[in-house]
Image (cartoon, rainbow, N blue to C red):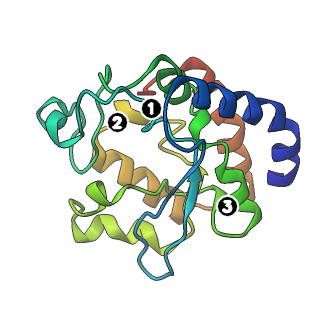
């Protein structure tokens, strides 16, 4: 499915690369290396919406504006985002290159989303059990409210997914991801 997705989405990926290149400095793709328990670190590919930002403020400067609970860092109207960066985040287009990670066996289409090191460092021990499986491009919490959820609810949904895993559940989440992304509910 990931290989087919890459082929079908290649015109969109090319358009995103051109838009990022024209709107901001830096590379068109970057590698994030989220922490992983029980496995070796993997470089996850992502379109750098973080670099498609204005240089006015760093995350440290904006920590007081964090709107998320728990370990997550989320700002609904992040002043660092350019127009292209905002569009990429709204429709989760920055995640599309991770299809390459799925093809390489480093990620799953469905599973717990990897967190950046800043967020991982703030996790409680019970949260870290979600790292015992491959990370996913989408998951149960993405189709259940995304950034609108409390962090503990997000982790509980990941555990629920892990406890009830089935191919049918994965297919159901994949199908629900499309309307969740298009509705932009909780996307920021």
Q: Nearer the viewer, mark 2 or mark 3?
A: 3
Q: Going by the image, does 55 lie left or right of 104?
A: left
Alpha carbon distance from label 1 to label 3? 25 Å
Q: Residue at x 28, y 68 (%)?
A: 126
Task: Tell me if mark 3 has few (under 14), some (14-19) or many (20+) residues whose alpha carbon lies within 10 angstroms of its own.
Answer: many
Of the image marks 1 and 3, the number of the one nearer the N terminus:
3
Q: Nearer the viewer, residue 115 or 51?
A: 51
* Mark number displayed over residue 145: 1
**86 lies above or below 128:** above
Q: Residue at x 50, y 57 (%)?
A: 112
Of the image marks 2 and 3, the number of the one nearer the N terminus:
3
Secondary-structure class at tag 2? loop
Q: Going by the image, does 78 lie left or right of 187?
A: left
Return the residue at label 2: 149
Q: Residue at x 53, y 22 (%)?
A: 84
Return the residue at label 3: 101
Task: Tell me if mark 2 has few (under 14), some (14-19) or many (20+) residues whose alpha carbon lies within 10 angstroms of its own.
Answer: some
Alpha carbon distance from label 2 to label 3? 26 Å
**52 lies above or below 30:** above
Location of residue 36 in the rendering, given as x and y in whole percent from the top left corner = 43, 72
Secondary-structure class at tag 3? helix
**137 lies above or below 165:** above
Q: Quadrant of residue 121?
A: bottom left
Q: Quadrant of residue 77?
A: top left
The reply to whether callout 2 and callout 1 are in contact (CB within 8 Å) is yes
């Amino acid at each position: 499915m990931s290989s087919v997705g890459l082929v079908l989405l290649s015109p969109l990926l090319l358009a995103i690369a051109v838009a990022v290149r024209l709107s901001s400095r830096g590379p068109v793709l970057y590698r994030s290396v989220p922490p992983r328990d029980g496995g070796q670190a993997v470089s996850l590919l992502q379109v750098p919406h973080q670099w498609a930002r204005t240089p006015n403020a760093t995350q440290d400067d904006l920590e007081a504006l964090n709107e998320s609970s728990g370990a997550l860092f989320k700002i609904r109207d992040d002043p660092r985002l350019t127009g292209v960066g905002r569009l990429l985040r709204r429709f989760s287009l920055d995640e599309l290159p991770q299809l390459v990670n799925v093809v390489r066996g480093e990620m799953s289409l469905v599973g717990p989303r990897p967190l950046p090191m800043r967020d991982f460092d703030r996790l409680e021990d019970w949260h870290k059990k979600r790292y015992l499986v491959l990370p996913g491009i989408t998951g149960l919490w993405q189709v259940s409210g995304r950034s609108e959820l409390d962090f503990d609810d997000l982790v509980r949904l990941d555990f629920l997914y892990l406890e009830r895993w089935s191919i049918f559940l994965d297919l159901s989440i994949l199908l629900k991801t499309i309307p969740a992304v298009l509705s932009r509910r909780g996307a920021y």
